[in-house]
C-alpha cells in the first residue's frame, strides 16, 4: 500500500486522536503539515509526535497546492468544516472531517458536491462505529438474529461545567452550530441511523438548564417515529454519570450497547418466563464475531487509506455524515416550532441553510464571556 502524505488542519483537543491514528499507521501514512491559527500549539504537537521536518503554518491555503499532501484531516470548529473541505477537495486532496460534518444540510451538500466534482474521498469521523460492540450488534441485526426491531432508546449523557462555553466558538449557533444534540449526541445519533435507518418523523423538546454563558441547548429529548417502531434519543450536559448507551427491544430479545441481552418466552396467560437458552445462543453468536484489529480513530483512518488504495468508498462517506446532520436538524426544527417534523427535509425548508436556522433558533442565554486562545486560560478542550 502506498504511503500517503497527511496534513492536520486545526491543532486543538481532537488533533492528537488523528495524530495517534496516523502514528499507528506509519507504514502507510506520513504527517507532513500541521496548521493552526496559533502555531505554538502546532509546534508542540510536532514535538510530541516527533514530526521533525513537517511544515507548520497558520494558513491552510498555503497547503492547497502541495503535491506531497494526499489526505487532509480537518479538526476545526464546525462552522469552518464546509469551506475548508470544499477548498481541499477542489485542490485534489482526500478529506477526513471531524463530526459534525457541517452545521447545516446546505453545507453538507456543498461538501458532497465538491467530493463528486473532484472524484476524491470525503469521510466524516464516526469513530464510535469502529468499536467491537457496535460492529457485532450491526452484524447480528443485519443477520436477523433478533427479529423485527420494536423500540430503541439512546442515552447520550455528558457533564460539562458552566465555563465550558467560555471558549470563543462554543455556545453560539453561528460558530458551534448547536449544543449537546449536535456536538455530543451526534456520535450516538450517527450509530442509531446506521443501525436502524432514518425515521419518518421527529418530535423534540430542548432547553438550557445549567449553562448561562451559552445560547445553545444543554438538554434535549426526542421521539423518532419509524414504520412499526419508535425510538427515543436523550442528550444532556448535566448528567454526572456520563453514560452513553443504546437499548433495543426486538421480537426475539432485548439487547444493548454496551453488550447485554435478555430473552423471554410467552406463557399461555400472556405473561412470560425467562429464556436462558436463547440468551446463551445470542451471547455465543456475539462472542463468535471477530474482534476488530483496530478501533476508534485509527480504524477509521485505516479504512479511508485502504479505500483510497482500493478505489472504493470509505465505510463512512459524506452521504452518511449528512444523514446524522439531517436527523439533528429535524430535532432543532421540531423543538423550535413545537411540533412533529417529517423527514426527509426539503431543500426549500427554512432549516436547510445556516442562515435560515440562525434566524429561527431559540437563544436560551446571551453569551457574555469569550476566551480566544486556550493557552491563555484554564479552559480546555478535554478533561486534561
Image (tube, helix red, strand yellow):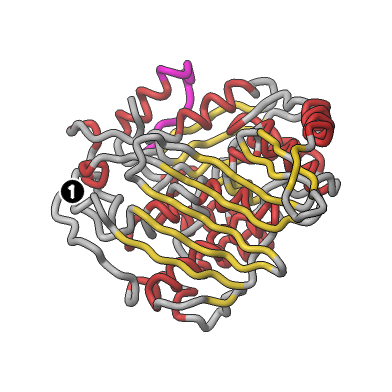
Which quarter of the figure is the N terminus placed in?
top right
Instruction: Say left or right for 121 vs 95.
Output: right
How many numbered marks are there? 1
Of 356 and 134, nearer the camera is 134
Of 371 and 41, nearer the camera is 371
Q: How many other residues sit within 10 Å of disc 1, few (<14), some (14-19) or many (≥20)?
A: some
Instruction: Say left or right for 288 vs 217.
Output: right
Which residue is at 34% across, 76% downward? 360
In the picture of the structure, the residue carrying the numbered disc 1 is: 370
Of 55 and 96, nearer the camera is 96
Q: Please check the rendered image and state whether residue 54 is part of the magenta-colored stretch, yes or no.
A: yes
Q: Can residue 169 be seen in this view?
A: yes
Establish if 353 lies above or below 65.
below
Instruction: Say left or right for 316 vs 268.
Output: left
Label 1 SS: loop
Q: Where is residue 156 in the image (x, y as percent from the top left)?
A: 47, 46
Magenta part of the protein: which range? 47-57
Q: Please check the rendered image and state whether residue 289 is part of the magenta-colored stretch, yes or no.
A: no
Q: Position of residue 309 (x, y in %)?
A: 78, 38
Establish if 2 lies above or below 239.
above
Which quadrant of the view contains residue 339? bottom left
Q: Where is residue 343 in the image (x, y as percent from the top left)?
A: 60, 74
Amino acid at each position: 500500500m502506498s504511503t500517503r502524505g497527511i496534513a492536520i488542519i486545526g491543532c486543538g483537543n481532537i488533533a492528537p486522536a488523528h495524530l495517534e491514528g496516523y502514528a499507528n499507521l506509519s507504514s502507510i501514512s506520513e504527517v507532513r503539515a500541521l496548521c493552526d491559527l496559533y502555531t505554538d500549539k502546532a509546534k508542540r504537537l510536532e514535538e510530541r509526535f516527533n514530526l521533525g521536518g513537517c511544515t507548520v503554518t497558520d494558513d491552510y491555503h498555503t497547503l492547497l497546492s502541495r503535491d506531497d499532501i494526499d489526505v487532509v484531516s480537518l479538526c476545526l470548529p464546525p462552522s469552518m468544516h464546509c469551506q475548508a473541505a470544499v477548498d481541499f477537495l477542489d485542490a485534489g486532496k482526500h478529506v477526513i472531517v471531524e463530526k459534525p460534518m457541517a452545521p447545516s444540510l446546505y453545507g453538507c451538500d456543498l461538501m458532497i458536491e465538491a467530493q463528486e466534482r473532484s472524484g476524491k474521498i470525503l469521510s466524516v469521523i464516526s469513530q464510535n462505529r469502529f468499536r467491537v460492540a457496535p460492529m457485532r450488534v450491526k452484524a447480528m441485526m443485519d443477520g436477523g438474529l433478533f427479529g423485527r426491531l420494536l423500540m430503541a432508546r439512546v442515552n447520550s449523557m455528558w457533564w460539562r461545567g458552566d465555563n465550558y462555553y467560555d471558549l470563543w466558538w462554543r455556545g453560539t449557533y453561528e460558530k458551534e452550530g448547536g449544543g449537546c444534540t449536535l456536538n455530543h449526541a451526534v456520535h450516538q445519533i450517527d450509530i442509531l441511523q446506521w443501525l436502524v435507518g432514518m425515521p419518518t418523523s421527529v418530535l423534540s423538546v430542548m432547553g438550557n438548564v445549567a449553562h448561562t454563558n451559552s445560547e445553545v441547548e444543554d438538554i434535549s429529548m426526542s421521539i423518532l417515529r419509524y414504520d412499526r417502531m419508535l425510538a427515543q434519543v436523550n442528550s444532556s450536559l448535566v448528567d454526572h454519570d456520563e453514560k452513553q448507551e443504546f437499548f433495543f427491544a426486538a421480537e426475539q430479545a432485548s439487547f444493548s450497547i454496551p453488550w447485554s441481552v435478555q430473552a423471554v418466552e410467552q406463557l399461555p396467560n400472556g405473561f412470560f418466563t425467562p429464556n436462558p437458552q436463547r440468551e446463551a445462543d445470542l451471547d455465543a453468536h456475539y462472542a463468535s464475531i471477530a474482534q476488530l484489529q483496530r478501533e476508534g480513530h485509527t480504524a477509521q483512518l485505516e479504512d479511508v487509506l485502504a479505500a483510497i488504495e482500493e478505489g472504493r468508498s470509505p465505510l463512512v462517506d459524506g452521504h452518511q455524515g449528512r444523514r446524522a446532520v439531517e436527523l439533528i436538524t429535524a430535532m432543532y426544527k421540531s423543538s423550535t416550532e413545537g411540533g412533529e417534523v417529517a423527514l426527509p427535509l426539503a431543500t426549500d425548508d427554512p432549516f436547510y441553510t445556516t442562515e435560515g436556522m440562525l434566524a429561527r433558533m431559540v437563544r436560551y442565554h446571551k453569551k457574555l464571556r469569550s476566551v480566544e486562545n486556550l493557552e491563555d486560560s484554564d479552559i480546555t478542550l478535554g478533561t486534561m
